[in-house]
Amino acid sequence: MSDAKPARRRRHDSELKRQVIAACAAPGASVAQVAMSYGLNANLVHKWRRLAADDGEVRSAPAL
């Protein structure tokens, strides 16, 4: 018998996804850096960006 933890998937709410995608859209932002700052895997963030682009939800970051 194995003592490994059972696999559990985390669920992220849509507001967090929007924040992460917006942070990635900022000029000079790195997806890897943004993912690390939120404690996420960069591959997951890339997936969210692709899905948002498919849905037409990608918006550029507001101008400063």
Image (cartoon, rainbow, N blue to C red):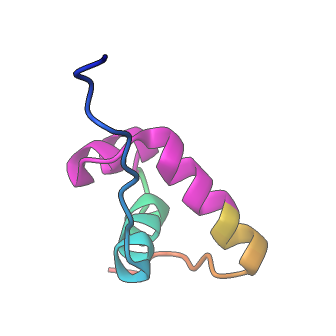
Give residue 11's position: percent from left, percent from top.
39, 65
Residue at the (71%, 69%) spot, across then down: 53
**Is 35 on the left or on the right of 57, as rendered?**
left
Give residue 25's position: percent from left, percent from top.
49, 64
Give the main secondary structure, helix, strand or loop, of the magenta stretch. helix
**Is 53 on the left or on the right of 7, as rendered?**
right
Among the 4 quarters of the image, the one containing residue 27? bottom left
Residue at the (74%, 78%) spot, across then down: 55
Give residue 54's position: percent from left, percent from top.
77, 70
Quadrant where the image shows the N terminus: top left
Question: What residue span does the magenta drawing correspond to?
Answer: 29-50
Is 33 part of what is drawn in magenta? yes
Q: Which residue extends farthest front? A: 1
* Tally of numbered tags: 0
Q: Which residue extends farthest top? A: 1
- Relative to 1, say whether 43 is above or below: below
**Is 40 on the left or on the right of 3, as rendered?**
right
Residue at the (22%, 21%) spot, across then down: 3
Among the 4 quarters of the image, the one containing residue 24? bottom left
Q: Nearer the viewer, residue 8 or 48?
A: 8
Is 10 part of what is drawn in magenta? no
Among the 4 quarters of the image, the one containing residue 20? bottom left
Residue at the (44%, 80%) spot, across then down: 14
